[in-house]
């Protein structure tokens, strides 16, 4: 009999216990041994729960119980999750987690401990909810050099943008609806400012490139400045505005960014709507492979946690954890050295003059139009331009026009 513990009984934790018992006999059969949850750790009381006898408040009971070989950490956040997970791995227990903040910040260190202790540290649920991405990237695509990854990694912002695009809803109203439907994080800034997507692309990039990419090194922009006017111009361009987390290998370094972007309707990412996520992986042998599905929610995320429990239980005498190294500061390319195309929307003092300055600085412009555009409004897409130079050029043009919108145009 394999005994496990679940730490945290919030949305993902309760989903994990639900999926575990719903499919209990199949799960035991897949492992080839009986498995049961011995403890559920949570500071709250759940007196009406059918599992009320399993609830404990003392982490030490799990840490010091030699019967417990696998622990699911679904508390979220860095504290106390980091100390708990580190102690468990050091004590020789395998850990599975849905905690993207923990993996994005401390992944290299925890993977190193797992390797030393010959136990496993799995985190399939940390990116893409129920979409299998971590294990396929590590196993099924391992023959490839991964050149590039681009993903819609946050369901809440994709829901908000979809409502703006399809229903003409203002940003604030769409956010309020996302919160009402329970999609947004407790603090919506983690979603709308791009931090959640940043943690996820850091995990995917670390796994693909073999070195830890730290979130604070990644240029991250959210979607709070996107307006309905920008969305309309994007439609006229033949695309959709999406929050994209992307990572690209450039020589022996990694360029990583999170930003809203114009994505052409020809891209597979453009038609990914509502809370769905999609991750495009560009391998040197496979070409593009796209993973699509529900990137958030109780049961899809629990599905990934329970699958990791099954894998850890099957492999409990054998560490086969994926692995990446810690990295020096210079591994991540400074975003100001990159080249991108940009969409700009301006309110001009003199439209002709502004367009002529713009064309001088940014090459032949692709002029965009929308229904009901102001007479003094100009919107266009530049050629590829260095990010630092573009920022300086924007300072110059702002003498003749008020810049209302700036969004990158990405080719995926
Ligand atoms: N708030 C996250 C999202 C939850 O909207 O994608 C899943 O990580």
Image: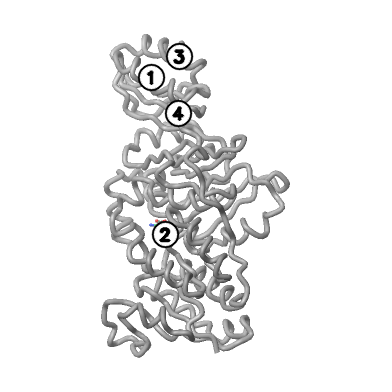
Give the image location of residue 180, x and y in percent: 29, 60
On the rendered image, what quadrant is the N terminus found in?
bottom right
Residue 300: tell me if it is visible: yes
State the residue at coordinates (52%, 22%). 383
Q: Is residue 216 above or below residue 154?
A: above
Residue 169, by quadrant, is top left
Q: Are marks 4 and 2 in contact (CB under 8 Å)?
A: no
4 or 1: tag closer to the N-terminus: 4
Q: Which residue is mark 3?
A: 361
Q: Whole-percent x and y of residue 270?
A: 52, 44
Colour scheme in use = one colour
Judged left or right of residue 364, residue 392 is left
Residue in front for this viewpoint, 54 or 229:
54
Counting the numbered discs, the total is 4
Dot 2: what SS?
helix
Q: Earlier in the sequence, mark 1 or mark 2?
A: 2
Kindly state the secondary structure of the residue where label 4 is placed: helix
Mark before the other along the chain sequence, 3 or 2: 2
The answer to which of 249 and 391 lies nearer the viewer is 249
């Amino acid at each position: 009999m394999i005994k496990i513990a679940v730490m945290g009984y919030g949305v993902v934790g309760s989903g994990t216990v639900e999926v575990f018992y719903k499919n209990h006999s199949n799960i035991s059969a897949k492992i080839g041994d009986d498995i049961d949850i011995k403890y559920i750790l949570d500071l709250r009381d759940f007196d009406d729960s059918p599992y009320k006898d399993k609830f404990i408040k003392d982490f030490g009971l799990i840490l010091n119980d030699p019967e417990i070989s696998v622990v699911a950490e679904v508390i979220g956040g860095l504290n106390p999750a980091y100390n708990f997970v580190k102690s468990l791995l050091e004590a020789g227990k395998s850990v599975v987690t849905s905690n993207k903040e923990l993996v994005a910040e401390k992944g290299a260190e925890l993977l190193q401990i797992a390797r030393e202790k010959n136990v496993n540290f799995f985190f399939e649920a940390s990116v893409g909810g129920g979409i299998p991405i971590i294990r396929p990237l590590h196993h099924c695509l391992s023959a490839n050099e991964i050149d590039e990854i681009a993903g819609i990694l946050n369901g809440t912002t994709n829901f908000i943008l979809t409502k703006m695009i399809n229903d003409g809803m203002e940003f604030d109203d769409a956010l309020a609806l996302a919160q009402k439907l329970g999609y947004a994080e407790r603090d919506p800034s983690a979603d709308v400012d791009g931090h959640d997507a940043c943690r996820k692309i850091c995990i995917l990039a670390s796994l693909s490139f073999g070195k830890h990419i730290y979130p604070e090194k990644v240029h991250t922009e959210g979607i709070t400045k996107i307006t309905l006017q920008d969305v309309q111009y994007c439609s006229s361009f033949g695309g959709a505005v999406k929050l994209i987390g992307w990572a690209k290998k450039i020589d022996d370094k990694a360029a990583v960014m999170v930003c809203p972007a114009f994505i052409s309707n020809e891209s597979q990412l453009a038609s990914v709507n509502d809370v769905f996520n999609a991750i495009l992986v560009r391998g040197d042998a496979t070409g593009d492979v796209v993973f699509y599905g529900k990137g958030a929610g109780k049961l899809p995320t629990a599905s990934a946690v329970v699958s990791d429990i099954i894998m850890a239980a099957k492999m409990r005498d054998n560490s086969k954890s994926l692995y990446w190294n810690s990295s020096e500061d210079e591994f991540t390319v400074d975003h100001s050295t990159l080249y991108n195309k940009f969409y700009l929307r301006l309110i001009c003092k003199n439209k002709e003059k502004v367009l002529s300055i713009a064309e001088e600085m940014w090459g032949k412009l692709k002029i965009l139009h929308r229904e009901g555009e102001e007479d003094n409004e100009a919107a266009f897409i530049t050629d590829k331009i260095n990010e630092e130079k573009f920022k300086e050029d924007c300072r110059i043009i702002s003498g003749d026009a008020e810049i209302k919108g700036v969004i990158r145009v990405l080719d995926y």
